[in-house]
Image (cartoon, helix red, strand yellow):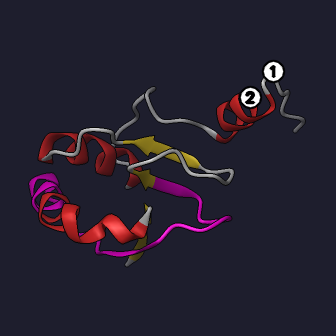
């Protein structure tokens, strides 16, 4: 079981059926529990750009197929370059290139 971080969570009722249908299409045994995305959440399914640092998939026109793609990356079943990484979030927020020091 893992949290399914949603931002903003207030919109969960409008997307719940689409997310459930998308999850069923993925045919995985991973159980997800929808919850509000907050700072430190990790990956986020975002319907708006989150105001905090996170890795997210921005879903501007919610539909079942967009949630299939987003969930497959969220659950680490596939990779998709359209996800915004933490470094990209910082670059956009700072208005300049931010370098990750490992």
Instruction: Indicate yes or no whether the magenta region holds residue 42.
Output: yes
Q: Badge 1: how crowded within 10 Å, few (<14), some, or many (20+)?
A: few
- Residue 79 percent coordinates (x, y): 40, 35
Q: Are marks 1 and 2 in contact (CB under 8 Å)?
A: yes
Instruction: Indicate yes or no whether the magenta region holds residue 70.
Output: no
Q: Return the disc, 1 or 2, that comes first in the chain's sequence.
A: 2
Between 19 and 27, the residue placed more toward the observer is 19
Q: Relative to residue 89, is residue 10 drawn left or right?
A: left
Whether 43 is drawn above or below 57: the answer is: below
- Residue 44 percent coordinates (x, y): 48, 55
Q: Which mark is residue 76?
A: none
Residue at (12% x, 65% y) in the render: 17
- Point out the stretch of residues depicted in magenta: 21-44
Q: Relative to residue 66, is residue 88 drawn left or right?
A: right
Q: Tell me, yes or no, if residue 51 can be seen here.
A: yes
Residue at (15% x, 54% y) in the render: 22
Between 79 and 97, the residue placed more toward the observer is 97
Q: Quadrant of residue 84?
A: top right
Q: Going by the picture, which residue comes out furthest to the right?
A: 101
Q: Secondary structure at mark 2?
A: helix
Whether 99 is drawn above or below 58: the answer is: above
Q: Return the residue at label 1.
A: 97
Residue at (21% x, 61% y) in the render: 15
Marks 1/2: CA–CA distance: 5 Å
Which part of the image, by quadrant, shows the N terminus?
Answer: bottom left
- Residue 34 percent coordinates (x, y): 35, 74
Q: Return the residue at label 2.
A: 91
Q: Tell me, yes or no, if residue 5 can be seen here.
A: no
């Amino acid at each position: 079981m893992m949290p399914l971080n949603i931002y903003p969570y207030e919109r969960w009722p409008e997307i719940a059926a689409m997310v459930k249908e998308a999850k069923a299409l993925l045919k995985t045994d991973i159980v997800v529990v929808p919850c509000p995305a907050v700072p430190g959440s990790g990956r986020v399914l975002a319907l708006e750009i989150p105001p905090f640092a996170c890795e997210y998939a921005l879903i501007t026109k919610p539909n079942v197929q967009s949630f299939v793609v987003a969930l497959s990356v969220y659950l680490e079943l596939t990779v998709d370059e359209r996800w915004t990484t933490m470094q990209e979030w910082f670059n956009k927020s700072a208005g300049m290139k931010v370098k990750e020091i490992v």
